Amino acid sequence: MRSTQRTLDRDLLRDIALVCLADGIVGLSYGAIAVGEGFAVWVPMLMSVVVFAGAAQFMFIGLVAAGGNPIAAVLAGLLVNARHLPFGFAVGDVLGRGWGRRIAGSHLMLDENVAFALAQDDPARRRVAYWTCGIGVFVCWNAGVVAGAVAGTAISDTDLFGLDAAFPAVLLALVLPALKDRRTRLAALAGAAVALAASPFLPAGLPVLLALAGVLLAWRPREKAAP
Amino acid sequence: MIEPWVVIVCALVLGAGTFAFRFAGPVLRARMELSEHAERLMATSAVVLLAALVATAALIDGGEFAGFARPAGVLVGGVLAWLKAPFVVIVLAAAATAALLRLLGVP
């Protein structure tokens, strides 16, 4: 029993390490792209520490570099990050008690560690997965950004390595067990369909939030049709 | 290029707003008694959001179709996940598929 547990933990840590490594490489490209777009070396570093949300950071740099209004770029970034609000409700108890843990744990909240936490059955493992992945990605992401910003365009196109496919695959692999439940699967499929349909028309971030409508769509008919 | 102080203010505002989104859930949750039904609903909501992220990250880039290589890689990863392949295999196969297809000239 104990050895099984230890193997499970080692597997979990190895999986988390892989995600940290991948995020570190994306951080490398973020630093390199930001500097390549003409930002000072400290800009991607500052953003990675205080914002710590890859998609919003890429969006901010991209919009401002393209001559966009910085206020609009901040709002676009906030819209992309609004999904952390429902994430926080789902994994809030994983952070633990006390303000220190809540503050640090909140700042470390990511798609990846939320998905890792949700994929664990046991509360203790959920906590380990959330914190390990959060701290690991924070360290790797920031180290990658520093290296990329200093070294310049060493790796600027991570699409060449297929890393853009790795990120959704990570989330998909972690979410798949939860989709065994029929109602959750219905909600997820409906939500994904709504997000895809809205994507061509709405700014980034909003389509994913609209996916929450899937929760209603899948829940209402079941409750009415309950025998 | 914009002034350094503008960049600093923007980073701080974006950081503070993002933190507020992240912080609200854990704090509000601790203040209320949640039914098991509500707990389940929130877990489902997170799964739905993640599924929508998978779909949009796989298929959409800048409001447009992301090309074939990326969703093909994600699909390979998804099939391997469904077959219960190890996580490392899933992730590396997804990346390798997309990279290989691009090498072959698939957009």
Image (tube, coloured by chain):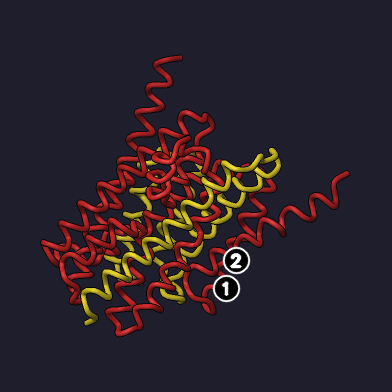
Is residue A55 shown left or right of residue A193? left
Per the rendering, the colour in which chain B appears is yellow
Q: Position of residue B21 (x, y in %)?
A: 48, 57
Seen from the viewer's position, the closer of residues B95 and A69 is A69
Q: How many labels does the image show?
A: 2
Which of the chains bears the disc numbered 1? A
Seen from the viewer's position, the closer of residues A178 and A147 is A147
Residue B105, compared with residue A84, is above or below; it is: below
Seen from the viewer's position, the closer of residues B99 and B91 is B91
Is residue A130 shown left or right of residue A63? right
Q: Residue tagged by mark 1?
A: A198
Residue at image location 81% in from the left, 49% down from the top: A223
Farthest residue to the left: give it: A151
Real-space Cα distance between discs 1 and 2? 8 Å
Q: Position of residue A109 (x, y in %)?
A: 42, 49
Residue A53, compared with residue A132, is above or below; it is: below
Q: Are marks 1 and 2 in contact (CB under 8 Å)?
A: yes
Per the rendering, the colour in which chain A appears is red
Residue at image location 43% in from the left, 41% down from the top: A99
Quadrant for residue A195, please give it. bottom right
Farthest residue to the right: give it: A227
Q: Residues within 10 Å of mark 2 (few under 14, many from 20)?
A: some
Tell me the element at label 2.
helix
Circles 1 and 2 on the same subunit: yes
Q: Residue tagged by mark 2?
A: A210
Which of the chains bears the disc numbered 2? A
Residue A120, compared with residue B99, is above or below; it is: above
Residue at image location 71% in from the left, 42% down from the top: B37
Tell me the element at label 1.
helix
